[in-house]
Every structure is written in C-alpha cells, then in structure tokens.
Image (cartoon, rainbow, N blue to C red):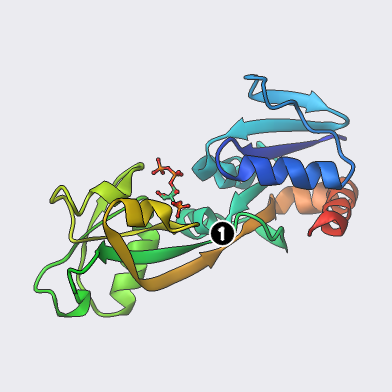
Amino acid sequence: MSLTVALSKGKLLQGTEALWRRAGLAFPEAEGRKLVVAMDGLRFLFVKDQDVPTYVEYGVADCGVAGRDVLLEAGSDVYEPLDLGFGRCRLVVARPAGSGLEYRRAASLRVATKYPRIASGHFLGRGVSAEIVKLSGSVEIAPGLGLADCIVDVVETGRTLVENGLEPVEDVAHSTARFIVNRASYHAQREAVSRLLATLQKAVA
Ligand code: PRP
C-alpha cells in the first residue's frame, strides 16, 4: 500500500526536496500548484507548516516532515523517529535592542508570538506572569508598534531581528526538521514506513 506524506510548503520545502533527491526518491516539481500529488508510490500533501502534525496525528497522512518548533507548539501525539538535520533554527525571547528590558523584573509583560503554547510554558517555568498575544507572522514588528514588550520567535540567520531593531536575550528551544509518523501507520504500514525511513536515514547529511 502506498504512503501519504504531509510536507510543509514553507521554509522546510527546499531542504525536504534536497533530502528526497539525495535519497534517490522522486519529488514533485516546484513550479506546480497542485497540493496533492501522487508520485512513485507516495502521495504528497503540501500544507502549511503548522498543519503537518495535524494531518499526521489524524492519520490523513502516514508520515510527514515538520520542524521541532512546530511539533512542540502543536503537542501532537506522533512518532518522531528521525532528526533530518536541516531547517536548523532556535526559538528565542527577543527585546528591543538596547532597551535593557529584564522581563523577570517587569511589573507586567506582554509577549507577541506565533508560538503561544511554547511561550506561555517558557514564562510559566520562570515564574513570570505574561500576557501572550498570538500573531500569525511578522512578529518582529510588534514591540516597535507598542503591541508587546518582547517576542518569542524563530531565529535562523538573525537578520529579521536586527532589521527590526530587536536583540535576542534568551534561548527557548532549538529546532531542526523531523520525520514524523502516525502511530497507527507505524504498525499497520510497518514495512513501507521502515523502508522510507531507512532510505531517508541514509541520505541525512
Ligand atoms: C520566520 C521567523 C522570523 C524569520 C527568522 O518568519 O518567524 O520572522 O523567519 O529568519 P531570520 O533569522 O533568518 O531572519 P517567516 O519568514 O516564516 O515569516 P512570518 O514572519 O510571516 O512567519
């Protein structure tokens, strides 16, 4: 039986395609806008980053590729058998550069983020009561516009922080792309899943 694989249309797509090709597997051409593509015994679903764990957890996809950041935020019940090594980034708390903001001492703290679950856990763990403002993107503009005192967001090159007048103050988590598998598929489709997993494992840089 063929496997359905949920992949991100976002930043992880390039690394995923490179991995697939290194592994000698066919991969749909980038120009296409078809979001469900069957090819060489696999069916690919191209979805938003945050939705990959959902498709896998609900069993619509047998497996997928998702960032650890997205997996931590989703808290999905899926197997995570392989670190794919690419998509390396970190989640940080960042504040306006030069502000000297010490959030542990702030009387009140508002935090803008795409990662409300991770952010509230982080501040709770430090005994800080923070109001979390959920955004869908462009989080770095929130402090400058008065929406938040600081942010929790992903940093890859650090360029977005710098260009928007922010500086990192604390690491929250580190992330890379992970191969994830639906729990039922892991058993019901053991042979196909193991074969794909072994093929990808050999190609991990
Ligand atoms: C991500 C992240 C940062 C940026 C970090 O945003 O949320 O904004 O990339 O990358 P850098 O450290 O290399 O500058 P994304 O591009 O996914 O867009 P978004 O703001 O719309 O979420």
Percent position of residue 22, x then y: 84, 47
Quarter of the rendering occupied by the C terminus: bottom right
Using residue 22 as the reference point, say whether residue 116 is left or right of it.
Answer: left
Quadrant in which residue 45 is drawn: top right
Residue at (79% x, 25% y) in the render: 38
State the residue position of label 1: 68
Q: Nearer the viewer, residue 198 or 97?
A: 97
- What SS does tag 1 mark? helix
Percent position of residue 179, x then y: 70, 54
**View extreme (left): residue:** 107
Q: Nearer the viewer, residue 159 or 39?
A: 159
Q: In the displayed structure, would residue 161 be above or below residue 57? A: below
Residue at (33% x, 51% y) in the render: 163
Residue at (38% x, 51% y) in the render: 160
| Dot 1 beta carbon under 8 Å from ligand 1 | no
The answer to whether residue 63 shows anywhere in this view is: no
Packing grade of label 1 (10 A; few <14, some 14-19, many >=20) is many
Q: In the displayed structure, would residue 35 be above or below residue 178? A: above
The answer to whether residue 39 shows anywhere in this view is: yes
Q: In the displayed structure, would residue 159 be above or below residue 98? A: above
Quarter of the rendering occupied by the N terminus: top right
Using residue 118 as the reference point, say whether residue 61 is left or right of it.
Answer: right
Q: Nearer the viewer, residue 49 or 147?
A: 147
Using residue 72 as the reference point, say whether residue 40 is left or right of it.
Answer: right
Quadrant in which residue 80 is drawn: bottom right
Amino acid type at mark 1: Arg
Residue at (33% x, 77% y) in the render: 125
Percent position of residue 117, x then y: 37, 59
Q: In the displayed structure, would residue 172 be above or below residue 72? A: below
Figure label count: 1
Percent position of residue 110, x then y: 18, 60
